[in-house]
Each structure stands twice: as C-alpha cells, then as structure tokens.
Image: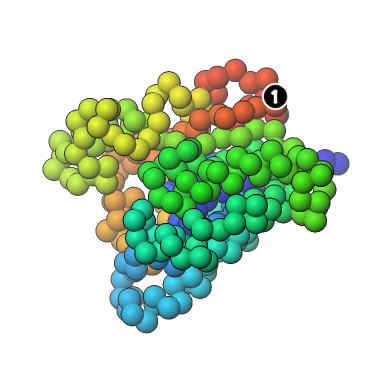
Amino acid sequence: MADPLGLMCVHAHPDDESISTGGVLARYADEGLRTAVVTCTGGELGEIVGPGMDVDAVRPRLAEVRRDELAAALGVLGAGAPRLLGYRDSGMVGTDGNSDPASFWRAPFDQAVGRLVAQLREFRPDVLVTYDAFGGYGHPDHVQNHRISLVAAEACAMPALYPEAGPAWRVRKLYFAAIPKTAILQATAELRRRGLPSPFGDAERVEDIPMGAADEEVTTTVDVVAWLARKQDAMRAHVSQISPDSFFLNVPEDLQQAAFGREWFIRQRSDVPAPVPEDDLFAGLR
C-alpha cells in the first residue's frame, strides 16, 4: 500500500510554522495525511519575551529552548519531530547577525540546498510550502528559505544531483505561504476602529503595505476554522517568543476566525491538473 499523501512546510525559525501554516498542518494531520516541518535556523537571535524568563540566563541557550518549544508545537499540530537544517539565526535586515559565517544568510548555497534535498527525499512530500521571494516580510532567513526551497524542490527529483541524499523524489505541488494585502488592510482598519494596535502598522492603502501578496496572486485559500484552537495552542507552546499579551493570542474573539481561520497560498507549480482558485493544497492529488 502506498504511503498517505504528504505535506512538508519549510520555515525559517521556530514559531513560523505555527503562525503561518499551523492550521493546514493540523487539518491535514487530522485527515490522515503525513505532515512535517523543516526549520532552517535555531532562532538564536529572537526576542525573549516569556513571562519570568531571565534574558541574560536564557540567551546563551536560546537555541535549545526554542528547539524544545518547536517540538511541543509540532506535537500539538501532529507534524512529527523537528527537522533542523542546523544554521544560525541571521537576525533582522542590517544587523550584525547577517555577517555571521554560521548564519543561514551566509550559508554556502549548495550545502544548504543539499541539506534540504536530504529532508525532501527522506520524507517524500507531495506538497511543499515555502515563502515568496520577499520572504513574507523581508527577513534574510525567510528570503534564503525561498531561494533554497525553490532549487531543492527541483533538484530532489534529479538522481544525478546530491546522490548521497537518497533516491530521487518529485514534489508534485509547490506553494508560497501568503497573506492577501486586502486582508491585512481590512484587519488594520478594524483594529484601528476598535482602538487596538495592529502589527501591520497604520497603512490606509494597499499600496502602502510592503508585505503580503496582491489578491490576484493568491490561488489557494484553506479553511482552518475548525483547527483554530490547535493553531493557537501551538503558538502558545513558543513561550519564549509569543508572550501571553501577543497580538496573535489577543485578537478579539469575534475577529479570530477572520484573522486566523484561513490560510492563504500562491501556487508556484503543479504537476497535476487542478483549477484555481482552489481550497485544498492537495487538490488534484486526491
């Protein structure tokens, strides 16, 4: 009997998987499909916001703390054990972390692609999710994630490339995780109307929003309302990064479904016929 269909999401830091793809990971796991997450860095340079955490004491072992949090979050989502590429967090644009030779941003490209190819060939996903060319919001690790994922998704199907990484495997559908710009604008306007802060700034026009995707680029919208509580529990597992007063955990209850009950994607390629727009990452595969 063939293995169930599989989804692999490639993320830059621990917590990214829960925020942007926690819903689809939980949904497809519950539907009996295989799910997995590859995390490219240890998140060593992230903020430490956990209640009662001593920043000076936690900082030297933050990668270990975040790895444990990642394992807990993946357990909530049913996405297996952490799969780590082993690079160091590069930090935000323009920070010293960008020049660290151990950082993901400075990783030898061929090496990083090879590490991801090995993960792809071992897990053999039918669907792969990564970021767009801007990495969602321009973080160097997210941009690098996009680059290596695109190449690894093609290279893993070619037996002559990275033969040491295992038998070739063809990813049949490739997606970029996205948020439509109009969804960002609507959320910002509603939060402003209620006198609440928005993590997206105070933009009043789509043209003023640097992150997100144009609505016409979004091909796939997956309903994850039934898995919203699981998604939020997974975010709560990232104690050091997502504090109890975080925006992600404090959206007014009547807005939660609109804010987090859908996850959006841009289909980059598909080997199977599946009309767009679609409401399932596995459309055409089952």
> Which residue carries the number 1 mark?
272
Residue at horizontal 31%, vertical 36%?
210
Position of the C terminus by quadrant: top right
Position of the N terminus by quadrant: top right
Density class for disc 1 (Cα within 10 Å; few <14, some 14-19, many ≥20) is: few
Q: Is residue 264 above or below residue 274?
A: below
Q: What x and y, as percent, mark residue 252?
A: 26, 44
| Residue at far right of view | 1
Of residues 152 and 129, the one drawn nearer to the viewer in this rendering: 152
Can residue 46 be seen by looking at this rendering? no
Q: Is residue 136 above or below residue 11?
A: above
Considering the numbered disc 1 on the image, is that residue within a helix, a strand or a loop? loop
| Residue at far top of view | 275
Residue at horizontal 73%, vertical 44%?
156
Q: What x and y, as percent, mark residue 173?
A: 65, 32
The quarter holding residue 195 reads top left
Residue kind at label 1, given as amino acid type: Val
Of residues 142 and 106, the one drawn nearer to the viewer in this rendering: 106
Residue at horizontal 37%, vertical 64%?
96
